[in-house]
Amino acid sequence: EATSARSDRLREWVEWFGIIRLVTSAIAVVVVCAGAWFLVRTPPPPTEASLPMAVSTSVAPGSASSLPNAPVVDPSTSLPPGPFAVHVAGAVAVPGVYELESGSRVDDAIRRAGGPTSEADPGQLNLASVLSDGDRIYVPEVGEEVPVTVAPAGTALDSSPIGPVDVNRADVAELDRLPGVGPATAAAIVTERDLNGPFVSVDDLERVPGIGPAKLAALAGLVST
């Protein structure tokens, strides 16, 4: 009887409230619950979060690595070469060691040495040859034969002896290998020391016919007594 009574009261309430109102209320409750769930739910992560992250390294500002596709420059090629020294000897006004700029040629070195003397024969040289540090330029006199005129730095000279040549002991063949000393001058050196005694100093070579101040200066450091 109790159950029947509750069923009767529910039926009476539904008839009083109306079927349409009941359905509308139920739909409203569902919509409100769905809206509340949408508001309080955890949002999905953005698409960017699933992409791999690039790891950047710390680069000093202004360095080549901070620029995309920046070329790598060798510091040694970006700096211009500095001046270098050459030895000018033979028939020039002032033989000696001179400092020249990069790209200088044999003609520039001869000009720095005061130019050729009146006895010089610069036609035997390649005046357009480019020089480098440590080169030696010997300007011969007219009629003088010079086997090697310009010796690049670091290159061994087959026609020149290694170390100073003792003019009191060397034979004609050894003396002939000296730059600017031909067979005739080499024989004259041997004859002079045999006839008049050994050379006391290198300057004594001026006793030899054909050896003047210019040629003596060219032999400086190459001969000894």
Image (cartoon, grey):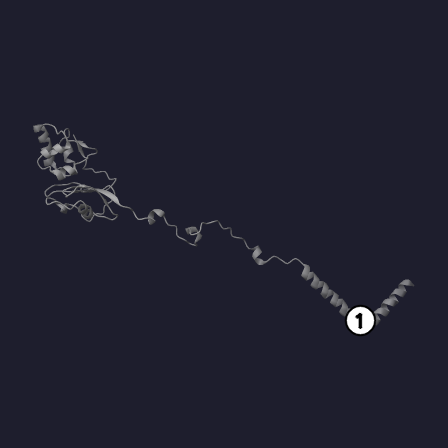
Q: Residue 102 location, x and y as percent?
A: 26, 48
Is 79 situated left or right of 17 in this image?
left
| Residue under pointer 1 | 19
Q: Quadrant of residue 24?
A: bottom right
Q: Nearer the viewer, residue 220 or 67?
A: 220
Q: Residue 176 location, x and y as percent?
A: 14, 35
Q: Nearer the viewer, residue 41 or 120?
A: 120
- Quadrant of the rendering where the N terminus is positioned: bottom right
- Quadrant of the rendering where the C terminus is positioned: top left
Q: Residue 55 location, x and y as percent?
A: 51, 50
**Circle 1 SS class:** helix
Task: Tell me the amino acid under the disc marked 1.
Answer: Ile
Instruction: Look at 8% across and 28% down and name the residue there.
Output: 196
Q: With respect to residue 219, does 53 lie above or below?
A: below
Q: With respect to residue 171, does 148 lie above or below?
A: below
Crowdedness near tag 1: few (<14), some (14–19) or many (≥20) residues, C-alpha within 10 Å: few
Q: Quadrant of residue 144?
A: top left
Q: Quadrant of residue 168?
A: top left
